[in-house]
Amino acid sequence: MIIIKSPREIEAIHQAGLVVAKVFQELDAFLRPGVSTQDVNDLVERVMAENGARSAEKGYCGYPAAACVSVNEQLVHGIPSPKRILHDGDIVSVDLVAEKNGFMGDACRTYVIGIAGERQKKLVEATEECFWNAMKLVKPGVHLGDVGHEIELTAKKHGYTVARDYTGHGIGTSMHEDPYIPNYGTPGSGPILREGMTICIEPMLLEGRSDLRVLKDGWTAVAKDGKLTCHYENTLVVTSSGYRILTMLDEEKEERGLTI
Ligand code: MF3
Ligand code: CO
């Protein structure tokens, strides 16, 4: 069942989303070679607490940490560890869900550590491009098959594949609500977007084949072929004329030329 949100609920999701955006702002300045994925987790917990929020990931289906921090071939759900040190040229996806006053905001950024290689930069840029191309389609009346198709098309254009085992989703008082939003689709098929839906669009791209394997920790999903992977996500609300991003600070929206 797809839940249409009231303006008050949308504002509450936005407030949770802004906490996630603040964490990313701090991570921008913090991430560098030598930092551990546990350090990232600790920063996430601190900044969320400072902003009246908590990590909805911690304890979710038994997930043991406050953040998902996935390095290189790890696509999603990387468990932070003090032993995992970030090195020059690594790409690290930080996927976060903040809960504030009972509502959730969910977003993911992939950062390049230190000096970026062309290979890493190209994958990160393509993954973000998938998100922006798909986002531009969002408005009432559009089928989710169109959104997923656009993500897959953009990934293919750059020579990448998309994950098929994980999807975007609706969000609200729960982290995952209907509708589910695959990173592939058939135009004109699937659920139809309506004003007041709050959704997470999250392209997950792979350099090589899309086959995944979950590590013995029960969570970390990695590319079977060991090649690089990348993830980018924002929470959006469908408005009467299009969309509004709920997990980005106004200054970042301005920098990117977004008027809303
Ligand atoms: N943030 C993820 C998503 O995009 C889910 C995190 S799974 C958890 O849906 F177990 F870490 F919570
Ligand atoms: Co999500």
Image (cartoon, rainbow, N blue to C red):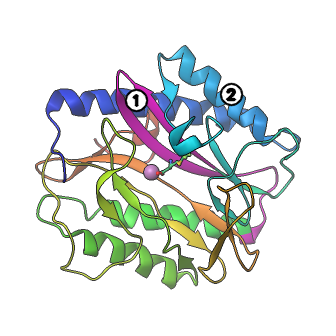
184 to the left or right of 59: left
Amino acid under label 2?
A: Leu
Locate residue 11, reporting x and y percent: 26, 28
Residue receiving disc 2: 43
State yes or no: discs 2 and 1 in contact (Cβ < 8 Å).
no
Highlighted magenta segment, given as a residue range = 94-119
Q: CA distance from mark 2 to mark 1?
A: 17 Å
How many marks do you count on the picture? 2
Name the one closer to the observer, 257 or 204: 204
- Give whichever of discs 2 and 1 has the lower sequence position: 1
Residue receiving disc 1: 16
Instruction: Tell me if residue 111 is in the magenta stretch.
Output: yes
Name the residue at 10% across, 49% down: 240
- Say which quadrant the C terminus sits in: top left
Task: Please name the predominant secondary structure of the magenta segment in the image.
Answer: strand
96 to the left or right of 35: left
Q: Secondary structure at mark 1?
A: helix
> Can see residue 250?
no
Locate residue 64, reporting x and y percent: 65, 39
